[in-house]
Structure formats: C-alpha cells, structure tokens
Amino acid sequence: MSKFKAVVFDWAGTVVDFGSFAPMGVFVKAFAEFGITATIEQARGPMGAAKWDHIQTMMAMDDIAAQWEAKFGNPPGDADVDKVYEVFVPMNEKVAADYADLVPGAKEAVDALREMGLKIGSTTGYTRSIMENVLPVAAQQGYVPDNLVCSDDLPEGRPGPLGMYKCMVDLVAYPPAALIKVDDTAPGIKEGVAAGCLTVGVAMSGNAVGKTPDELAALGEAEVDALRQHATQILKDAGADYVVDTVADLPELLRQLDSAA
C-alpha cells in the first residue's frame, strides 16, 4: 500500500496536449485582435498561471506594453487585461479540444496509480468553460480524474495553494505530504509547494520543451538532453522534488519512493 493517498495532475503539457500547444497560438491571435504583435516565446513564458494572470504578465512585458501605449495612448491596466481576456477565452474554448490527446502512456500510468490505491485529482490554469470542451475528449480516451479545479473556481489561482486545498477536500486526502502534485510549469509546481505537497515536474511533454513527440524523435540525443536539462532546471528552480520525462514515468518513481519509506 502506498504511503501516498492522491496524485493531482495538471492538464495541458502534463496529461494531455504533449508540448502544450493549445493556448499558444490563441494568445498571439488574441493580442493581434488589438493590433499588438506577440510572439509564441512571449506566450509560453507565464504558462501554467490562470489565463487572466497570464495575459496580465504578457501585458507587462516591455515590448507588449510599449506597443499598447503607442497604439492606445496609455500603459496597459487591468481593464485592458479584461478586454484581451474576453477575446482569448472564447478562442481557447474552440481549439482546446483539438489538442486534448493524452500524452503517450498517461492512461496506463493513471491506471497503475489507481491500482496502488491512489485517488486522481486535477487542477488547471484553464477556465471551466475551456475544460468543458476538454473533459469529454479525455474521457473518450479513458481519462476521468476524480475531481477538477479550474482557474476560475476559486478567488486565487496558481502559484497559490488554494487549488490543492480544494483537491484535499474533494478527494478527502490529507495531510498535504500524502499528496503529489504533477505539473509541467513553474506556477503549477509552486502550487504544490505552497500547499506542502511533494512535487514532480514533467520535463519532455511540457511547455518548456514545447515540441511534439515526432519533433523530439527527429532530434539528436545531445539536442534532446539539452532540452531536458533546460526544462528540468526550470522545474527544479520552482521547487520540484523530482523531475521525470513524462507522466508515463510516474508509477515507477512512486514505487521507488514507497520502497524507500
């Protein structure tokens, strides 16, 4: 029997959407609606945060803030973030389901964790309206977690701990050390750290690498390792206790942790 009671997974870049592609183009398109040029690199920077916070962080970037002020005559404020957010959410709702394929090995990993007696929770930087499009696609592939906490369900999102606290209540799983938070982004890892949970980062399927399995397969070993080290450092800097390539590696890690107990 595992000393852990639950594993709480992120969604995009962790369990679905290998490479975390769904929101990237939408952020760029949403800013373009206001005549602002944003890059994919800029869009990837705050990934993992609630989407309103993500847009606010992008708006504060020197290049984007300068473009906004030049076009509208004032530095971007919260009301401007609201405007971009109102454009972004419907766009993301439309495309999220197209990027909801499970990460290879994810279903098998979740099945193995359930066989260990673990509950399966989930938190996300997506709004609930976006997740309503993702949930049925994931369910068709056999992934139905025991709960879901979205970015707009609570007064505060990542990197704060409230989403994890809600998981503890929903799953009746405690103390915090009995839960594992699994995520591909710094804000998601920090969410777990803030709640006092053990944290596991996933490097190769996530936002920091940002490549499909086919793109990774086309790279040389040294290139792949450089990407792995880059992503691992981001996750470790955020407080990850462990880092694996993908969720497919998680059951083995948990077996090792249990045997070391």
Image (cartoon, grey):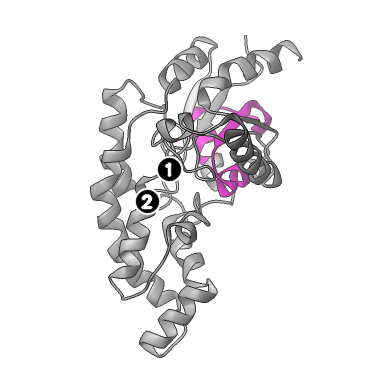
Seen at 36% across and 24% down, the residue is 143
> Is disc 2 placed on a helix, strand or loop?
helix
Seen at 47% across and 71% down, the residue is 59
On the rendered structure, is 65 left or right of 160?
Answer: left
On the rendered structure, is 243 left or right of 6?
Answer: right
Seen at 39% across and 33% down, the residue is 16
> Is disc 1 placed on a helix, strand or loop?
loop
Taking 114 as reference, is 192 above or below it? below
Residue 203 image point, x, y percent: 57, 36
- Residue range corresponding to the magenta coloring: 166-191
Q: Looking at this view, is 153 or 190 the one in front?
A: 190
Residue type for callout 1? Ser
* Residue 57 magenta: no
The residue under label 1 is 20
Taking 58 as reference, is 239 above or below it? above
The residue under label 2 is 23
Check whether the beta carbons of the residues at disc 1 and disc 2 lie within 8 A of each other.
Answer: yes
Question: Any mark on residue 181, and which?
Answer: none
Would you say residue 127 is visible in this rendering? no
* Residue 169 magenta: yes
Residue type for callout 2? Pro
- Tell me the quadrant of the picture where the C terminus can be found: top right
Q: Looking at this view, is 243 or 132 the one in front?
A: 243
Q: Looking at this view, is 250 or 36 the one in front?
A: 36
Taking 253 as reference, is 53 above or below it? below
Taking 60 as reference, is 43 above or below it? above
Would you say residue 150 is visible in this rendering? yes
Measured in 3D between alpha carbons, the distance from the residue under mark 1 to the one under mark 2, in whole angstroms, is 7 Å
